[in-house]
């Protein structure tokens, strides 16, 4: 991940609503990997310091997609949502990124 400033107060951060039930289903938490969901927006990076326990990288990919959709929904009132959600593993290596760009464009109506 490219270096950048840490997120200022009020910077939006992904909610992990889908994660808790998945982590609870795992029998041995010590063997479950931790994944970190960092948000990059306007050259500002919000680093996930806590991470979440998920059974696999595939589950982290699915969670990242769900989280990105939730984040877009939260930002639509701004007429624009533009960010990257990067998922890191426990070693700090970026596994993949979910890029989101949604713009609401108003069309002028003819008279």
Image: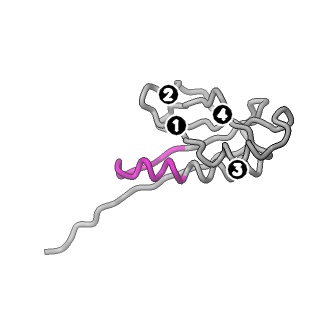
**Type of secondary structure dominating the magenta stretch:** helix
Q: Position of residue 70 (x, y in %)?
A: 51, 51
The mark closer to the camera, 2 or 1, is: 1
The mark found on residue 7 in the picture is 2
Q: What element carries label 3?
A: helix
Q: Distance between the residues labelled 3 and 4?
A: 17 Å
- When the figure is inspected, residue 8 is found, relative to residue 73, above or below; the finding is above
Q: In which quarter of the image is the C terminus?
A: bottom left
Residue 74 lies in the magenta-colored region:
yes
Toward the left, the furthest residue is 111
- When the figure is inspected, residue 85 is found, relative to residue 101, above or below; the finding is above
Q: Quadrant of the N terminus?
A: top right
Residue 38 lies left or right of residue 35; in this view the side is left
Q: Where is residue 10 in the image (x, y as percent from the top left)?
A: 42, 30
The mark found on residue 13 in the picture is 1
Q: What stretch is highlighted in magenta?
A: 69-83
Residue 11 lies left or right of residue 89; in this view the side is left
Density class for disc 2 (Cα within 10 Å; few <14, some 14-19, many ≥20) is: some
Residue at position x 62%, y 53% in the image = 65
Q: How far apart are marks 3 and 1 (CA)?
A: 17 Å
Residue at position x 82%, y 38% in the image = 32
Q: Name the residue tied to disc 4.
A: 1
Q: Give the mark, 3 or 4, whose residue is nearer the N terminus.
A: 4
Q: Name the residue tied to disc 3.
A: 61
Q: Distance between the residues labelled 2 and 3?
A: 23 Å
């Amino acid at each position: 991940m490219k270096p950048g400033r840490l997120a200022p107060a009020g910077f939006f951060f992904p909610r992990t609503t889908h994660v808790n039930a998945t982590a609870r289903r795992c029998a041995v938490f010590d063997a479950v990997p931790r994944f970190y969901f960092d948000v990059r927006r306007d050259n500002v990076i919000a680093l996930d310091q806590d991470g979440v326990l998920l059974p696999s990288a595939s589950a982290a990919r699915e969670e990242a997609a769900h989280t990105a959709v939730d984040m877009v929904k939260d930002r639509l009132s701004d007429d624009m949502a533009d960010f990257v959600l990067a998922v890191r593993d426990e070693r700090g290596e970026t596994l993949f990124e979910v890029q989101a760009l949604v713009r609401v464009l108003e069309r002028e109506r003819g008279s």
